[in-house]
Amino acid sequence: MNICIFCSANRQIDPDFLTATEELGRWAALNGHTIVYGGVNMGLMEQVAKAAVETPRPRGQASHTRTIGIVPRIVEQQGRASQYNEMEVACDNLNERKQLMEERSDAFIALPGGIGTLDEIFTVAAAATIGYHHKPILLYNIKGFWNPLIQLLDSLQQQGLIRGRWEDHIHVANSLEEIKQTLDI
């Protein structure tokens, strides 16, 4: 499975976020999944890719690309592309980046992040609500990070601003075990 990871590229991150991100990267690698991500060499982006690439392959597991970095050219020019991009796909802007990430992924997991992460979550969620895809979207709610967003989504739904239930398109996982259950893998 190609799992797209949306997350922060900032360095000043809660250590528990780094630990959970590393655990996710190792789990993906050990189970033969590929991480599709923003390809930057900082923050949680670097952590998930490093963990995936540095995790030894189990005996008998076929060799495959463990990380695909979708990197805007401006990021490459600034020298911020990760050394852990086993495959790197260049793009011209953030809209193209999101489109490439969506096309190359079977599921999406949002780790703690800021404006860029919110943009990515809502782009794929809006596409799902319209019917462009039926891929799972998960908020990895490490230490309750996504609780304020969950409250906002609940409020929007209560006010009739969301058709149906937002949980039909965005799932909340509070642990790696819940991620596995939601993805049914």
Image (cartoon, rainbow, N blue to C red):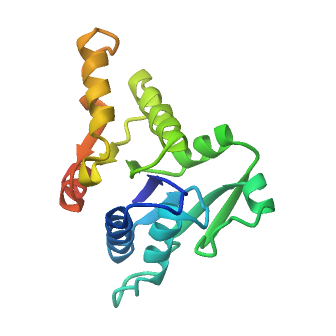
Q: Nearer the viewer, residue 62 or 114?
A: 114
Give x and y (percent) for residue 33: 40, 66
Residue 31 in the image: above or below residue 5 = below
Name the residue: 77% across, 54% down: 73
Observer able to see residue 105: yes
Split into 4 quadrants, where in the image is the N terminus? bottom left
Q: Nearer the viewer, residue 31 or 173?
A: 173
Q: How many marks?
A: 0
Residue 123 in the image: above or below residue 64 = above
Give x and y (percent) for residue 107: 39, 49
Name the residue: 21% across, 57% down: 175
Residue 99 in the image: above or below residue 11 = above
Q: Find residue 160 and report its image quarter.
A: top left
Split into 4 quadrants, where in the image is the C terminus? bottom left
Give x and y (percent) for residue 64: 50, 75
**Residue at the extreme right:** 77
Name the residue: 39% across, 69% down: 25
**Residue at the extreme top:** 160
Q: Nearer the viewer, residue 101 or 93?
A: 93
Q: Find residue 88 and report its image quarter.
A: bottom right
Observer able to see residue 132: no
